[in-house]
Image (cartoon, rainbow, N blue to C red):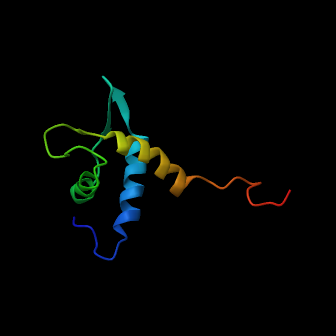
Amino acid sequence: MPLPPNLDEEKVSEAALAILGLTAFSSHHITRAWKGMDWDLLGLLFQKGWIEDPVGKSKSVVLTEAGERLASEFLVRHFERASPDRGRAV
């Protein structure tokens, strides 16, 4: 299914990479994640240089060094709960 045109592609890409990072595993110094996402979305992550080309018979996709680093960053940025004491005056 094509991505709806009214979506913020930057936000969707960051969220998708963060979620891919949750399923990532390392083998022989390569980080892979299962490619269970929409092909258009995987294509967008490939265009950004966060994953290697997702087209092929493999059931997983390889995260680039930047993709591996950013997956963790985006996970925290978009999904981390605020600390209960964050923002309180001390």
Specify whether 21 is left or right of 73.
Answer: left
Name, please, the residue furthest toward the bottom: 6
Q: Is residue 47 above or below residue 25?
A: below
Residue 2 location (% of width, % of height): 22, 67
Q: Which residue is at a point 43% across and 49% down the rendered structure image?
A: 18
Farthest residue, direction left: 56
Image quadrant containing the N terminus: bottom left
Q: Position of residue 55 (x, y in %)?
A: 15, 46
Q: Is residue 52 left or right of residue 9?
A: left
Location of the C terminus (image quadrant): bottom right
Residue 29, image x, y percentages:
33, 25
Q: Residue at x 62, y 54 (%)?
A: 81
Asked where in the image residue 61 lies, by quadrant, the reply is: top left
At 24% from the left and 55% from the top, the residue drawn is 47
Quarter of the image for residue 59 reads top left
Give the left or right position of residue 18, taking residue 4 as reference.
right
